Image (cartoon, grey):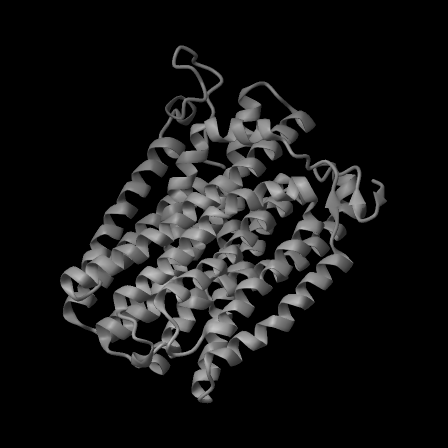
Amino acid sequence: MTARGRWIQQWDPEDETFWNRTGERIARRNLLFSVLSEHIGFSIWTMWSVLVLFMGPEYGLTPADKFLLTSLVTLVGAVVRVPYTFAVAVFGGRNWTIISAGLLLVPTVAAFAVMEPGTSFSTFLLVGLLAGIGGGNFASSMTNINAFFPLRKKGWALGLNAGGGNIGVPVIQLVALAIIGASGGPRVLLGLYIPLIVVAAVLAALYMDNLASVKNDTGAAKDAARDPHTWIMSFLYIGTFGSFIGYSFAFGQVLQNQFDRTPLEAAYVTFVGPLLGSLIRPLGGWLADRYGGARITLWNFVGMGAATAVLIAASMAQSLALFTVAFVGLFVLTGLGNGSTYKMIPGIFQAKAHALGLEGEAAAAYGRRLSGASMGLIGAVGALGGVGINLAFRQSFLSYGSGTGAFVAFLACYAVCFAVTWAVYLRRPAARSAGVTPATEEKPQLSYAEV
């Protein structure tokens, strides 16, 4: 391994001697500061889930306006994940972390400038769209960290990286709770984050590294887009992360509109679900490392369906206590599923490499190439689930005056996710059903149950 100008020229984490001697220490250092930048990115992306709680009648916005605003913020955060994924290869992981962290100043300063009664709804929409760039930090961070760790450690590393980022959602909600409780305004909240963004960019510049081996490979992007597993996993990620980010934006608004909670009462509860869902994500990755991502994902969708059924019952009975407990439980399961589904991605492409007859470093390189390229697409499509959730809530409140109709739709979605996980990754022979092994061949039969 040689380093020049924060560029590491040789990197082989699958070599245990290299990993134990120097690789693990460097990988963990990059993971730490990647988490910090991604954490703040998530906070800025989801800040409008908090800002709408500050926006009382004097702002002139209806509940439908607020759901539309958060839907568009989520949409931009999903779309920018694709270019952010490939920016790592163009600029380097360290360099892009500096740039992407610095870009977070744009939506934060803009929101600080316009956050007052009398601002037009169109202006709020425009500034909200800028906040979407915070969602891109997840994709670039995951692509970067995926390259640093060996396959046997990816579930834990990716889970910790993503969980540390996801926890930016409840952190900004907790800070908002403190500010609302102290009778502060939204500009106080925004003013706290401006210096934090600068600190994250500076620390990335001082302590992170670029990997020269992560090259801009447009062929990998095309291959990943053509592979059916990219789109299957995108759909499953809609069910897990799409639910997490969608509920993170919508939870407080649902409590306000369906149960007549005040902004302070809603804020007291809103942060709990995203907090627990973020903290448990690394556990989902660890369980996937130990028992297989497909198995954990399958049973996780069973749990999500059960929690959603309880939510429907609680919503119809107007039971705030049961509704809150079930919603928090659903958040926990989304976090667990986030960790297990993302662990599946490198495992799937590593398994495909072996099915193609590749071994050793060739198989590892193939897996890193396609899994890194696919992560941006999977992350982007998965985040679109958050758009769908907010639009579903908007329509449900317009049509029925509650979120019950939306929860029925979500329950159906989780049932389909369960069926897809079983049919593609657990039904035997899995390779044949996944289109990996031709139907005319008896062997090798590849099982994805361990991915």
Question: Horizontal and vertical percent for residue 448?
Answer: 46, 32
Question: Horizontal and vertical percent for residue 336?
Answer: 44, 54
Q: Is residue 2 left or right of residue 24?
A: right
Looking at the image, residue 279 lies above or below residue 359: below
- The residue under the point 55% across, 59% down is 165
Looking at the image, residue 189 lies above or below residue 214: below
**Towards the viewer: 187 or 433:** 187
**Residue 19: quadrant of the picture:** top right
Looking at the image, residue 415 lies above or below residue 356: below
**Residue 247: quadrant of the picture:** bottom left
**Towards the viewer: 254 or 16:** 254
Question: Horizontal and vertical percent for residue 282?
Answer: 53, 55
**Towards the viewer: 336 or 6:** 6
- The residue under the point 31% across, 63% down is 67
User: The N terminus appears in which quarter of the rendering?
Assistant: top right
- The residue under the point 52% across, 81% down is 188
- The residue under the point 23% across, 47% down is 412
**Towards the viewer: 81 or 379:** 81
